[in-house]
Image: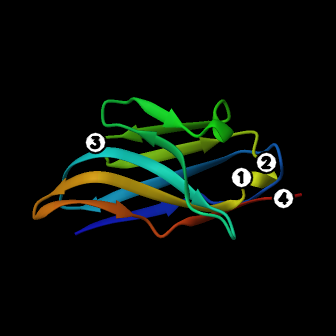
């Protein structure tokens, strides 16, 4: 099977920065797209940013110019650099891997999430 493990969340003041990391492990052959979603209390999970295997990216309008997604295909890792953080960025951030080809199948996978809190 495949597992995604996030790290790097925490408490930061408004205007600060955090870098989230996600490592995919298992018998992975390839991963199509990797991305970050977030879910704030009482709200639906929403896309933050996604990056394809070729490097093309897409961002939610609310984070454009502040967040940067990147990935290391050789290590099956994806990162989210978050700058100029705002209180409304507070949420649980989830890593997502789309169309993961592994030794015994193909599927989409989610991490368990990491809490990001932006507060003074």
Q: Secondary structure at mark 4?
A: loop
What residue is pinned by disc 4? 119
Residue 85 x/y as whole percent: 75, 45
Residue 89 has which mark? Answer: 1
Q: How far separated are the C-alphas under marks 3 and 4?
A: 36 Å
Tell me whether the residue at label 1 lies in contact with that at label 2, contact meaning CB atoms closer than 8 angstroms: yes
Residue 86 has which mark? Answer: 2
Residue 69 has which mark? Answer: none
Tell me whether the residue at label 3 lies in contact with that at label 4, contact meaning CB atoms closer than 8 angstroms: no
Q: Secondary structure at mark 3?
A: loop
Give the label, 3 or 1, closer to the camera. 1
Q: How far separated are the C-alphas under marks 1 and 2?
A: 5 Å
Question: Would you call the spot at circle 2 few (<14 residues within 10 Å), some (14-19), or many (20 or more)?
Answer: some
Residue 63 x/y as whole percent: 65, 39
Give the label, 3 or 4, closer to the camera. 4
Location of residue 84 by image quarter: top right
Q: Is residue 62 left or right of residue 13?
A: left
């Amino acid at each position: 099977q495949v597992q995604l493990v996030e790290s790097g969340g925490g408490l930061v003041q408004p205007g600060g920065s955090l870098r989230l990391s996600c490592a995919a492990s298992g018998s992975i052959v390839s991963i199509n797209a990797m991305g970050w979603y977030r879910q704030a209390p009482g709200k639906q999970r929403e896309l933050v940013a996604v990056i394809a295997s070729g490097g093309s990216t897409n961002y939610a309008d609310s984070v454009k110019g502040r967040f940067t997604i990147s990935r290391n295909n050789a290590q099956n890792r994806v990162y989210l650099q978050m700058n100029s953080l705002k209180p409304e960025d507070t949420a649980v951030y989830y890593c997502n891997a789309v169309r993961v080809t592994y030794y015994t199948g193909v599927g989409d996978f989610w991490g368990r999430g990491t809490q990001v809190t932006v507060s003074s």
